[in-house]
Amino acid sequence: MDLLDLHRSSIDLNEKLWADLSEAHLDLATPCAGWTVHELLRHQVAVALEFAASARGTTPEEPADDDPLTAYRVASDAVAEAFRAPGFLDRTAEFPGYGPRRGKDLVAAHFVDNLVHAWDLSRALGLDSTLDAEPAAAAFRMARHYPTTPDVRGPGGAFAMPVDVPADAPITDRLVGLLGRSPRWPA
């Protein structure tokens, strides 16, 4: 799969998971420290809108609808469309919070974020959280290059510090561990 297809597959996975949510699920805890399912969804909508605006060189829009699933779909479609603009992967755009980067870096970061949040949501809902091997391996290769500086890792950063996971663990466990989640959450 190419990068744009990987990105879309992570959105599709989240949309499938979000579609089965009920009101009762919204207050469940997630592996994202201090976030409920509802807060995770709000985060994903906001990030998609920020990345879409960065890709287009505009100001982020407000969520399109009060219904969280509709807002996620609209925001995700907007960012996927913006990322597919001719030449975007090779041009420079503002990476929200981190300055100018290549378009493909924005796509990669949004892909990794969406894929790992699909794992977060699956865990929160008590579902099988094993990610498909190809996207998980691609996300792991990308995330291995993330800096470990405080603006990226730790309090206030995009991810927590890595969690030790055996090198021979399944790729899903290695990916989420790399991004600061215990593969055994909530244990």
Image (cartoon, rainbow, N blue to C red):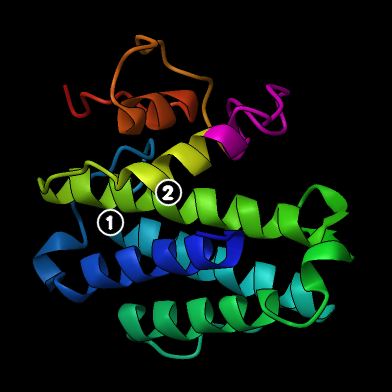
160 or 78: which is nearer to us? 78
Residue at numbered disc 2: 135
155 in the magenta segment:
yes
Q: Alpha-carbon neighbours of circle 1 within 10 Å: few (<14), some, or many (≥20)?
A: many
Quadrant (top left/top right/bottom left/bottom right) for the C terminus: top left
User: What amino acid type is highlighted by mark number 1?
Assistant: Val
Judge whether 112 appears above or below 41 on screen. Answer: above
Q: Nearer the viewer, mark 1 or mark 2?
A: 2
Tags 1 and 2 touching, CB below 8 Å: no
**Residue 104 rendering spot, x and y as whole percentages:** 73, 58
Q: Alpha-carbon neighbours of circle 2 within 10 Å: few (<14), some, or many (≥20)?
A: many
Magenta range: 141-158
Residue 109: which numbered mark, if any? none
User: What amino acid type is highlighted by mark number 2?
Assistant: Pro
State whether the magenta stretch is mostly helix, strand or loop: loop
Q: Is residue 163 left or right of residue 185?
A: right
Q: Quadrant of residue 186?
A: top left
Q: Is residue 116 something that shows in the picture?
A: no
Q: Residue furthest front?
A: 1
Q: Is residue 73 left or right of residue 107?
A: left
Residue at numbered disc 1: 37
109 or 151: which is nearer to us? 109
Closer to the chain start, of discs 1 and 2, is 1
114 in the magenta segment:
no
**Residue 168 rendering spot, x and y as whole percentages:** 33, 13
21 or 27: which is nearer to us? 21
Q: Secondary structure at mark 1?
A: helix
Judge whether 144 appears above or below 89 on screen. Answer: above
Q: Residue at x 41, y 51 (%)?
A: 115
Q: Kindly report the distance in space between the C-alpha atoms of the residues bearing marks 1 and 2.
A: 23 Å
